[in-house]
Amino acid sequence: MRIEDEIKQPVFKDDFQKAYINLIFTAGWLEQQQRAFFKDYDLTLPQFNVLRILRGQHPKPATVNLLIERMLDKTSNASRIVDKLEAKQLVTRTVCPSNRRAVDIRITETGLQLLLRLDALLATQQIGLQHLTPEEAAQLSNLLDKIRD
Amino acid sequence: MRIEDEIKQPVFKDDFQKAYINLIFTAGWLEQQQRAFFKDYDLTLPQFNVLRILRGQHPKPATVNLLIERMLDKTSNASRIVDKLEAKQLVTRTVCPSNRRAVDIRITETGLQLLLRLDALLATQQIGLQHLTPEEAAQLSNLLDKIRD
DNA sequence: CGACATTAAATGTATGTACATATATTTGCA
DNA sequence: TGCAAATATATGTACATACATTTAATGTCG
């Protein structure tokens, strides 16, 4: 559906404004789909993303700093996201032995299993960019990189 | 900057995953820039967007429903955003005479003047897609529309 | 060594958001 | 008419986010 129809705004100042608004809108649209999907599993998007980062590190630990570096939303509060995951026993938190200011965060076996289940479900759920060709996806990514130059 | 470097993730599963993550990240990146800009004017992004919708309607009133239709984030609470704007005297709220369930919302002269100032500043601040050509912006918009098909 | 800057994480606080529910008004139609 | 359904907005609540500040540990350099 064209962005003009999505937000019932028939004209835009120029192609820049139109693409800008489309970008914010589409990102929100995708996030909404994911949020609905994860709701059944009592996970928020940032929680899911942190779990994936931890799986990427596994079996090495991550610190809060490393999470912040890799998170999509750098302003969200990594400490408190880890709080929630710890309460659900999806991660563990131990003081880093070599630097007692830092905290070693690790995904638990339960956490890994949850991610496995979600991977399988996400693959069948058609959440994402399945309307694009691989070439279009690559093109999109290049345009987005260029925006942030 | 390439998304790989932004979030320190050297490889992605495929171009779809990469573009997906890039899209969410870039939208957040743009929003962060705007937020920083608007902070000096004590406006949040949703508040600014509502003000612009109201200016588009001016001098006709808008209802809460119309705002929801046109807002980028449809799940945010239009009523309470209008509360904040009303407290700052940027909008007025009166019961709609022809349908007393509805509320007529109008931007005030103060609100219009604030938008004028912000328009001028935003034009000079290079917030947006100025690294793209008009053709690239149009191409981006088309790809985004396609995602939501 | 010891004072001071730096770093890592946690916490405080105000605000925003998501989602369900409530309240008031209007509409449709038996 | 009268009553259930639909509509428009507001409110309640739990949680997330933005950003400043605090606490604790480590580094540094006289």
Image (cartoon, coloured by chain):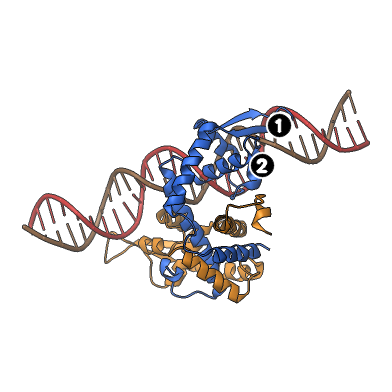
Chain colours: A orange, B blue, C red, D brown
Task: Look at label 1 and name its amino acid.
Answer: Arg
Residue at horizontal 55 percent and vertical 66 percent from the top = B136
Q: Nearer the viewer, residue B119 or D5?
A: B119
From the viewer's perspective, tell me whether residue B2 is left or right of residue C5.
right
Task: Please tell me which residue is depicted at 31% across the width and 61% down the height of the picture.
Answer: A102
- The x, y position of residue B9, in whole percent, is 44, 71
Quadrant of the rendered image containing residue A68: bottom left
Give the residue type that dot 2 points to. Answer: Leu
Q: Secondary structure at mark 1?
A: loop
Please give the residue where the numbered disc 1 appears in the rendered image.
Answer: B101
In the rendered image, the quadrant that contains the C terminus of chain A is bottom left
Q: CA distance from mark 2 to mark 1?
A: 14 Å
Which of A113/A146 is in front?
Answer: A146
Marks 2 and 1 close (CB-CB < 8 Å): no
Quarter of the view holding residue A91:
bottom left
Q: Secondary structure at mark 2?
A: helix
Q: Which residue is mark 2?
A: B66
